[in-house]
Amino acid sequence: MRKVVITDPPRTDLRLVDSLAAYGVATVHEALGRVGYLGTTLRPIQRGVRIAGNAVTALCAPGDNLMIHAAVEQCAPGDLLVVTTTSPCTDGMFGELLATSLRSRGVRGLVIEAGVRDVAELNDMGFPVWSAAVSAQGTVKATAGAVNVPVVVGGGLVRPGDVIVADDDGVMCVPRADAGAAVRASQARTEREEATRAALAGGQLGLDRYDLRPLLRSQGVEYVTAAEYAREGG
Amino acid sequence: MRKVVITDPPRTDLRLVDSLAAYGVATVHEALGRVGYLGTTLRPIQRGVRIAGNAVTALCAPGDNLMIHAAVEQCAPGDLLVVTTTSPCTDGMFGELLATSLRSRGVRGLVIEAGVRDVAELNDMGFPVWSAAVSAQGTVKATAGAVNVPVVVGGGLVRPGDVIVADDDGVMCVPRADAGAAVRASQARTEREEATRAALAGGQLGLDRYDLRPLLRSQGVEYVTAAEYAREGG
Amino acid sequence: MRKVVITDPPRTDLRLVDSLAAYGVATVHEALGRVGYLGTTLRPIQRGVRIAGNAVTALCAPGDNLMIHAAVEQCAPGDLLVVTTTSPCTDGMFGELLATSLRSRGVRGLVIEAGVRDVAELNDMGFPVWSAAVSAQGTVKATAGAVNVPVVVGGGLVRPGDVIVADDDGVMCVPRADAGAAVRASQARTEREEATRAALAGGQLGLDRYDLRPLLRSQGVEYVTAAEYAREGG
Amino acid sequence: MRKVVITDPPRTDLRLVDSLAAYGVATVHEALGRVGYLGTTLRPIQRGVRIAGNAVTALCAPGDNLMIHAAVEQCAPGDLLVVTTTSPCTDGMFGELLATSLRSRGVRGLVIEAGVRDVAELNDMGFPVWSAAVSAQGTVKATAGAVNVPVVVGGGLVRPGDVIVADDDGVMCVPRADAGAAVRASQARTEREEATRAALAGGQLGLDRYDLRPLLRSQGVEYVTAAEYAREGG
Amino acid sequence: MRKVVITDPPRTDLRLVDSLAAYGVATVHEALGRVGYLGTTLRPIQRGVRIAGNAVTALCAPGDNLMIHAAVEQCAPGDLLVVTTTSPCTDGMFGELLATSLRSRGVRGLVIEAGVRDVAELNDMGFPVWSAAVSAQGTVKATAGAVNVPVVVGGGLVRPGDVIVADDDGVMCVPRADAGAAVRASQARTEREEATRAALAGGQLGLDRYDLRPLLRSQGVEYVTAAEYAREGG
Amino acid sequence: MRKVVITDPPRTDLRLVDSLAAYGVATVHEALGRVGYLGTTLRPIQRGVRIAGNAVTALCAPGDNLMIHAAVEQCAPGDLLVVTTTSPCTDGMFGELLATSLRSRGVRGLVIEAGVRDVAELNDMGFPVWSAAVSAQGTVKATAGAVNVPVVVGGGLVRPGDVIVADDDGVMCVPRADAGAAVRASQARTEREEATRAALAGGQLGLDRYDLRPLLRSQGVEYVTAAEYAREGG
């Protein structure tokens, strides 16, 4: 691993970033063709938050948050810090003091594939965090890593300047080059969904709206009564 | 697996269903002789909800929610949809649009041994869900399965028309034939517990109330001081 | 295992206990030299609670809460009950009735490396619980164990009379002999953190405050532009 | 739960059972329409064994093997004992002495959703076991359960007299009523596979043998060179 | 944590240690009253090995094997090295070179609640290892810990000079003070088991040998035919 | 996700690939600077195998092995197939027939972040496989994905033509551009280790060979007798 801090990573236009935040993870993920979701293990510390930001990445040794401190300096307003470790770690690598520091730089939140602590204080501050664990176990500041290199988080690839969208459904990464298209596709999907929502609320069935009955038939699904089913041996 | 939709599953009288909801999972589970609990992995998306309903079941392929759409059509007021997959799956197979559809049919909630998404929207709607995961990862509508066949969920057997009771303690299944007895036993247990609660709140010990001291003696439990314990080599 | 109930375990002065509660798990854990944290699997049933108490310990057979009843009798005001099992168990070994009993004796909370139930009722009561699972599955009262012997909980050793501190960050154990020193060190740390918090909020970087730049240099970390990084083959 | 021992469970003809053993889990599972597989957590203690037997079932309390002893008496030559617990348990509920007892009755093996011990001795005896865990932790004989009732094991339903097939790929359950059809379908599949194996060994592609190229085309899969892919932005 | 290397830990007489090895984990665990088993997560790298040794303990930072090197110096013939980390770690903290070093000092094996690597080479050497993981991920030698202090491994307490017994069933710890009694109890148990084994092999049932029929009766277990069971509603 | 099959992925010179196989995962991982290890969850189906090959990648839908068939056609002698899914999947996506097909094309093995089946047959064939699970659960051939695009496997990035090295220690990925340097560094490391092995076998301590004593001193590690340690309060 090259020990490096990249000082001028690309960033996505904040207007695009803010649009993506408004749509949320599930919608953007659909709009993007169902790629970029960072898995079910990154869970929100706070419920009901929906944000997006430019990824600044930090790659740390397990149990060592030295490179988070190095990453803070590289953060700008509108960024969202993305942290992972070179091997699995549940220690509390991030807490209220680092959140204070990030907030003072205009950073919108944290995604970390490791543990965090000071959960009560983070809640009081309203600083949004998605993490793989909560742990009071402290860390050292001893081993160099890298800032703003591509990292794998939650089984997905995140590059500096990609857009991270996060809410109660988890975290996803929109590649920088795809941000504009993702906004347009999310908008289109949202409009379609509004019509669908109204139809379903009015009692139309998904079977009809999505024209699924022929598919069921073609796959040989039978509609039978309970009595018929029992008679035929279940 | 037979690809089938059973159109007239049995149902339990809603007065029994509603009575069971009032007692909650832990009480009904005790009253039923400690069977039917569907394990620790099905967790509520919302806290503080306590419901019961008639099970309508859907068996899906992993990553494919076609049969949830087929199941919606089979749902009636007072039902509770129970979904599982033929192999383990954490994808977000259910979201706000399906919840809208279920609600329009009078369905009371969802239990799913897979993932759900649109968590914030489900909370806003107040549609109760118990799931094994949260995931924004979308699914397809491509593979047939079955509706209203017996399914295994959370390590337990659920048949259409069984009563599902769900609250913060998890989910349980009361076989349809046992619903009446479960209501009576739950009522009896609730009354006994009220007396016990008052006694314990007043300072009586469980050791005395349940007459456990002879059991401790018969198993050779000694009461010793710390000094005696240390002297005898711990 | 010796089947024993120790009737006069040592206890830590409640003034020390209460001081530790005020600092919280993360601070005390740091102050104590980063030992005693009981791992990431013991999670709070309620959010936003921060307590401390004298450990009374109960060692139970899996699926059997007989010794919790025996332990209740040994509890005094200011205590916190710590329960574990001889092999892993997720059953609901503790619920609202036992909480009522503990509360009537002035016990402050429960830490249990097993399951609990009656979660809604425990929340209504405001009785604080940290557990490894939630489960409605009931238990029996059949097998003897021990009360107030040293136990291993969450990968750490807890002895009767040690101070348990618990909050949203998890649970930790302060050995009785270290309680006074832990208070003093926590106070010192809190004061230092206040100054650091102000500095970071004002924009000072951790890199400078903790003098980490020489460390980065000595480990060969380079600061490069994205263009330079790409040119050198990443 | 009803505490009951059923003394005359149905059994499947051993000629069918033995035929299924010869085909193995993967083939029978396919032949049966991909149902009945008991999941990835039941692993063989010995490698390279392939057996089948009539299910005799035992439902135990966790950490309590009383009902395994009751089940032994109900076993006959050609049976295979299937054990589960009312809540999850990794304790060593079965060891060399019980294996000796089962062997003396002509039982072919054990499937247990809990722990086993005496692994070296079981290997020396050549008694086949599939379990969810290995653990030296002993159990008691204290709590009643049931023998030869339907049980859920590995997420699947097993009824007494169903055929259990087990090998290195895991464990599956063939319902008694389906055993004959499963033998015929397995035989047909085996013959088809032999031809396919020869064709593939000779270099024919699955794409051609299964006629998958039109499917790829219809779903819009493009074949491109690396240069084209890079040019189009990946 | 005190950073300390204890240079003259107590040791158990090797004649006792060797006797315990001969009985194996399951027997000694039973003989000791079912305490001291170090859980199901420590698995053997080699199958079919059964050893015992005097515990020398090392407490390391995660991802850092400095203290293993310090521990090697404290090892003597007949010892068995026991390693754990201050927070969970799967990295490969131990490999063939350290095994070479330990072997040259007469150490009998390794128990480590973390990862190991060079598995093929360890097998070729025949150096016995029980670990929580296998991982090629390397570690550093940077952070001090402790040698020969009490440690918690696999949920159990291990003190220097305790006897570690390990085989295919896992790992257990016999406190030094209990080693003599454990040998005597293991011998007695082995003799009893021999008689039981012969009886069971001859067809006697556990129900009769352990006199379990009255227990089944007292708990209300009924013996019924399948027809009776079906008639009574299962 | 773009549905694409890249037909002419780059490949690494097989002489480099074969050299890396000879060194094995742990050595190459060290030589490469401790990056590229694909985690502890990909385990070998066979023990004692050590191979390397050029990565051909397949990205599949969960429970769907259509793209494995498409990938076979893209394989050439010396390749190693790397398969992952768009969301987690333990189904048996690969078995003996696909192995037969791969072998006929000169493919050296399979790495799959999902399940495999026909384990006994794969062992008989001697076809090397590393997988995240074993499962008899079959899959369909219905959904398009991609072949020879970059994929994330085991938390690491694998691009077509990278070198996969796999043995009992797990799986690692050497970027194509680094293969030559990795061979040279592995050779140098191997030579150094040979000298170290001889020294350690001869009794030299790691503390002296790696000059670790000053580090222990500088971090304040004390060497004390057990009596001193006890006197000072442990």
Image: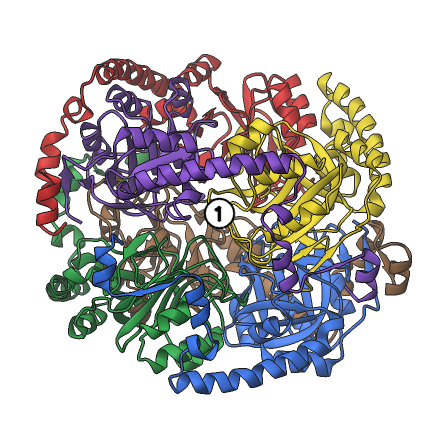
Chain colours: A purple, B yellow, C red, D blue, E brown, F green
| Of residues D89 and A224, the one drawn nearer to the viewer in this rendering | A224
| Of residues E131 and A188, the one drawn nearer to the viewer in this rendering | A188
C122 left or right of A157 in image: right
Residue found 18% across the figure and 19% down from its top: C204
| Of residues C129 and A119, the one drawn nearer to the viewer in this rendering | A119
Identify the residue position indicated by label 1 in the image.
B138
Q: Position of residue C181 (x, y in %)?
A: 34, 19
- Whether A209 is drawn above or below B62: the answer is above
Disc 1 marks which amino acid?
A: Gly
C160 left or right of B183 in image: left
Q: Tell me the chain of label 1.
A: B
Give the quarter of the image for residue A25.
top left
Q: Position of residue F203 (x, y in %)?
A: 17, 61
Give the quarter of the image for residue C39.
top left
Q: Position of residue F105 (x, y in %)?
A: 32, 80
Secondary structure at badge 1 equals: loop
Q: Is residue D83 visible?
A: yes
Residue found 70% across the figure and 26% down from its top: C97
Q: Position of residue F96 (x, y in %)?
A: 46, 77
D155 left or right of A80 in image: right
Give the quarter of the image for residue D110.
bottom right
